[in-house]
Amino acid sequence: MKILVTSVKGGVGKTGIALNLATYIGAQCVTNDLVVSDNSGIIQIEPKTKSMPIKFCANVPVVFDFGASYNSIDPKLARAVKLSNVIAIPTLTDARSLQGTIDTVNLVKVVGKPIVIIINNFTSESKFNHAKDYLIDALGQLPIFAIRTTTLFERVAKDGSEWFSKVHHIKGEYQLNKTRIAHELVYDAIIALGAKK
Ligand SMILES: Nc1ncnc2c1ncn2[C@@H]1O[C@H](COP(=O)(O)OP(=O)(O)OP(=O)(O)O)[C@@H](O)[C@H]1O
Ligand SMILES: [Mg+2]
């Protein structure tokens, strides 16, 4: 299984979601971010590298965490779109993020891969509903999932992906374990779409 997490908008949660997703399915998390922290477990494609390294094209599980540019599809992103079984676009609920999400869908939809949107990092139900209605108005029906604001992302960033898989064994992490289960439902739905023939 290969999954592409992408958006033309920065700071929407691509890296956090891609890393969690990769950890969950036992895939490599590969990014085109310019800066990657050493202990994150994320594999960075050297910014100078123009095309997709061959080792990520092979039949191995990969989650691509790829920022995209508004006006042109770069060759690595184009390849990731073709290689991936499903494309996930995280978005925040503000107007610029929603427009960025619409632009991203229009950029990648030509290839005909299943696309899902993840409304990410929100706390208010009304903001979530507004974002969802706005996106369906602009794009028609497509799968939209929710990931609320959660400290799970900080914990994965701080303690590495190892921690994510162990949380249910740690005392006092009950709430985070519930969040982890909520995440896994979203990830399962994405994987199921990617597995559809
Ligand atoms: N659901 C969430 N709950 C809490 N914090 C979140 C959530 N999603 C993202 N964040 C935080 O928001 C910030 C931006 O997230 P992230 O780095 O994953 O976005 P990105 O799209 O990869 O950004 P960039 O465009 O810079 O690569 C991070 O500090 C991350 O921990
Ligand atoms: Mg990132």
Image (cartoon, rainbow, N blue to C red):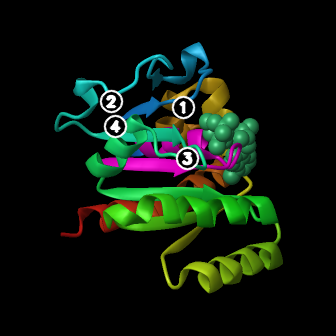
User: How busy is the neighbourhood of tag 4: few (under 14 within 10 Å), some, or many (20 plus)?
Assistant: many
Separation of residues labelled 1 and 2 (CA atoms): 30 Å
For badge 1, the amino acid type reads: Trp
Spatial CA span between label 3 and label 4:
13 Å
**109 or 5, which is in the foreground?**
109
- Circle 3 packing at 10 Å, graded few (<14), some (14-19), many (20+), is many
Amino acid type shown at disc 3: Ile
Range drawn in magenta: 1-22
Q: Which mark is residue 52?
A: 2
* Residue 20 x %, y %: 51, 43
**Quadrant where the image shows the C terminus:** bottom left
In the picture, the disc for residue 59 is none
Instruction: Identify the residue under disc 3.
Output: 17
Label 2 secondary element: loop
According to the picture, the residue beneath numbered tag 4 turns out to be 27
Type of residue at label 4?
Answer: Ala
Q: Please determine whether, in this image, residue 115 is positioned above or below residue 140.
A: above
Cβ of mark 3 under 8 Å from ligand 1: the answer is yes
Q: Are marks 1 and 3 in contact (CB under 8 Å)?
A: no
Q: In this orientation, does residue 44 appear? A: yes
> In which quadrant of this rendering is ligand 2 seen?
top right
- The circle on residue 163 is 1
Q: Which residue corresponds to the image point at 69% horizontal and 43% vertical from the top-left?
A: 10
